[in-house]
Image: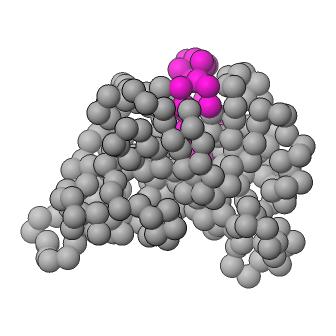
Amino acid sequence: MNSLEVTFLGTGTSQGVPVIGCKDPVCLSQDPKDKRLRTSAMIEWEDQRYIIDCGPDFRQQMLVNQVDKIDGILFTHEHTDHMIGLDDIRPFYFEQGDIPIYAEPRVLNELKKRFDYIFNPENRYPGIPSVNTFPVSGKPFFLKNLEVTPIRIFHGKLPIYGYRFGDFTYITDAKTISDEELEKIKGTKVLVLNALRKHPHHTHLNLAEALNWVEKIKPEKAYFTHISHLLGFHEKVEKQLPKNVHLAFDNLKIKI
């Protein structure tokens, strides 16, 4: 298998950066790396292209990156900033047919509630997309020739999934993890992890907690995502991090 290429489609928290009406200096920054769409990523290898999470900025992210085909979408959980862009798969559906989506059953059920017109054949009308659903459990599965291992993490009290793709692991919206699940991540070369802000949050890792996870997992490189303006200026925070740890930013591409 050829190397993976990962594109950070968005690296912001649920409100994005800048936040509407925000007068914080980070929100007012003119540095493009301080402007963050809602968190999402694109994984590519050989002729395959998968999206992780499909939030409210999905259309813009596809246009900016000139994406003309996707092979499927993996969902980490059902919060609005990670799933509400599903309707914008329509252009892909028109060209490709049903779009595969992967999520645990609880998340699939929530998608069916919010997008009843997509999932309910009795209410179908021309112009809406269609999907093929693939339930995710804790067991590894394959996307073509790439093994994917779901990683159970907790977003506060909500159980959600991160995903390991070979030597690359993508985790967002985490707060806690069991020792057993942590072992599934060890050995990964590149780790993506959420780091919301500097002071503690009840459902997200803050910067110190994210750095502690990096120390435990010991990847070759780590990138932080799902960042709010409260973390600080990208350029300033980046200089304070260990050499193998970086703040991700929108449209950053890395190869594994």
Which of the pair 60/177 is nearer the observer? 60
> What colour scheme does the image use?
one colour
Looking at the picture, does residue 87 appear above or below residue 102?
below
* Rendering coords of residue 44 (x, y %): 43, 43
- Can you see residue 56? no
* Rendering coords of residue 69 (x, y %): 33, 57
Which of the pair 110/144 is nearer the observer? 144
Who's the residue at 53% across and 44% down the image? 6
Give left or right: position of 189 versus 125.
right
- Residue 123 sits inside the magenta stretch: no
* Rendering coords of residue 232 (x, y %): 84, 58
Q: Quadrant of residue 229?
A: bottom right
On-image quarter of the N terminus = top left
Who's the residue at 69% across and 79% down the image? 20
Q: Residue furthest left?
A: 122
Who's the residue at 72% across and 72% down the image? 18
Which of the pair 79/133 is nearer the observer? 133
Give, as a single range, the part of the protein colored magenta. 167-190
Looking at the picture, does residue 72 appear above or below residue 62?
above
Which of the pair 229/145 is nearer the observer? 145
Who's the residue at 66% across and 64% down the image? 36
* Rendering coords of residue 169 (x, y %): 55, 33
- Can you see residue 206? yes
